[in-house]
Amino acid sequence: MRATALITSAALVLTSVPVSAQKAAGGGPPLLRDAETEQLLREYTRPILRAAGLEKQNIQVVIINDSTFNAFVADGRRIFVNYGALRDSETPNQIIGVLAHETGHLAGGHLAKLREQMASAQTQMIIAMLLGIGAVVAGGRSGVGGNAGAAAIAAPQAAIMRSMLSYQRAQEESADKAGVKFLNATGQSAKGMYETFKRFEQQSLYSAAGADPYYMSHPMPAERVRALEELAKSSPYWDKKDDPALQLRHDMMRAKVSGFMERADTVYRRYPLTNDSLPARYARAIAAYRHGDLRNAIVLIDALIKVQPNNPYFHELKGQALLEGAKPLEAIAPLKKAVQLSNNNPLIEMLLGQALVASDKPAYSDEAVTILKAALSREPEAPIGYTQLAMAYGKKGNLAEADLASAQAAYLRGDQKTAREIASRAKTRFAIGTPGWVKADDIVNTKPIKN
């Protein structure tokens, strides 16, 4: 995970590349990127998506920089998960259950259907309001007070809102059922899914007291949890445990999230020195470098590498710590090792490219361009990759390509004004009609996104 400047549905996201946080396209919440965590989440979702018939739709799990336990779908191709959900899920099965529920929303086409319902409700509200205004006017003309007209406006709106929320609750129940179905189809337990929703039922007992159930965005917790429990316990896989090796990877991910995203004192409370487990040592190593103790961090990371010499994320962490500790030349070797061991993970390649650029050695500029272009061919929506590519081209004196890469970075960050300005300058540096000119022209002519 990279914690740098670059860096809904059910009640219920970091990198050995340092957590790279960026704004979602269109100015959404800041996202977190992490090679290790994203690989684990891909392995969690792949069988679920296959069971749902969505395997070929390139659905991605996106990590949100939010400490609360939540996950949601906001379009038809991404599942968003808060890093708080990753940190607080005690077993792989718990987060897999959440992902299965969200896949249920995608498989059911719930977003498109909900939009249709909202459009219909909007029309109904307009009609109801017009009729209510008519009643107010009629009441005024007849000398009768406006209370009846006001009631005529409020009553239909309340009924329409109840209908909308009822429809949304039905979607949640449908996603629960679909999620259990996908877990059964993949031979996995729904116990983690049940445990998660049971936890939220208990947390919401007080806040839900006295609330009108029709105005809740989900079914009444107790009702929903009872239905889910009955369904989940009917599965032959109810008592199936997570594989110990997978549990260790999950624990390592949780330790990484804590190390990168929490205060040092919080990390040491979660992972005290008396805890000699690999996840605890991982968390403390990250916390040491993140909070300024680079020398001790390198000692701790080297000890981790000694235990698992072929773990690419330990080498990545060492390279990241050295790079952010103003030692880019020393960072290159461990990052090259991490790239090799991770089968050329593009996020780690971008970090290597950053180290090559920061080394200030002209001989490394060509290598940085090659590595960054290869990474961006597989991760074309990563602003940090284009930012580093722009710097590499700048060091080579290729101002046209440097401007184009800077424009692409700004565009992906959601800063369209800056993107168009830099792209306009890039067009003057390229020959008309060349690929670079065409790309720059595309950015210049992109219509502004209206919020």
Image (cartoon, grey):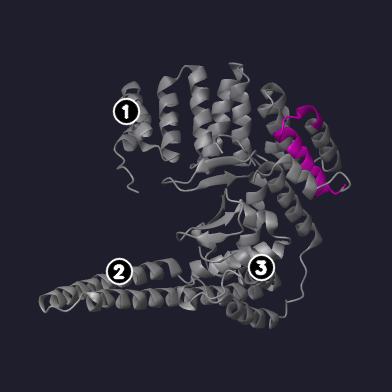
Q: Position of residue 394 (x, y in %)?
A: 48, 20
Q: Is residue 28 magenta?
A: no
Quadrant position of residue 417: top left
Q: Give the main secondary structure of the magenta stretch.
A: helix
Q: Position of residue 101 (x, y in %)?
A: 57, 69
How far, Cα to Cα, is label 2 from label 3? 34 Å
The residue closer to the viewer here, 101 or 334, is 101
Q: Is residue 189 visible?
A: no
Residue under numbered circle 1:
424
Q: Earlier in the sequence, mark 1 or mark 3?
A: 3
> Tag 1, which secondary structure?
helix
Residue flagged by tag 2: what amino acid is it? Gln
Dot 2: within a 10 Å radius of its alpha carbon, few (fewer than 14), some, or many (20 or more) residues? some
Q: Is residue 136 visible?
A: yes
Residue under numbered circle 3:
196
Count all numbered tags in the image, as a single digit. Answer: 3
How far, Cα to Cα, is label 1 from label 2? 41 Å
The residue located at (49%, 75%) in the rendering is 169
> Tag 3, which secondary structure?
helix
Q: Is residue 291 magenta?
A: yes
Residue flagged by tag 1: what amino acid is it? Ser
Dot 1: within a 10 Å radius of its alpha carbon, few (fewer than 14), some, or many (20 or more) residues? many
The residue located at (58%, 40%) in the rendering is 20
Magenta residues, start to end:
276-296
Residue under numbered circle 2:
122
Is 221 displayed left or right of 397 in the figure?
right
The residue closer to the viewer here, 282 or 352, is 282
Quadrant position of residue 153: bottom left
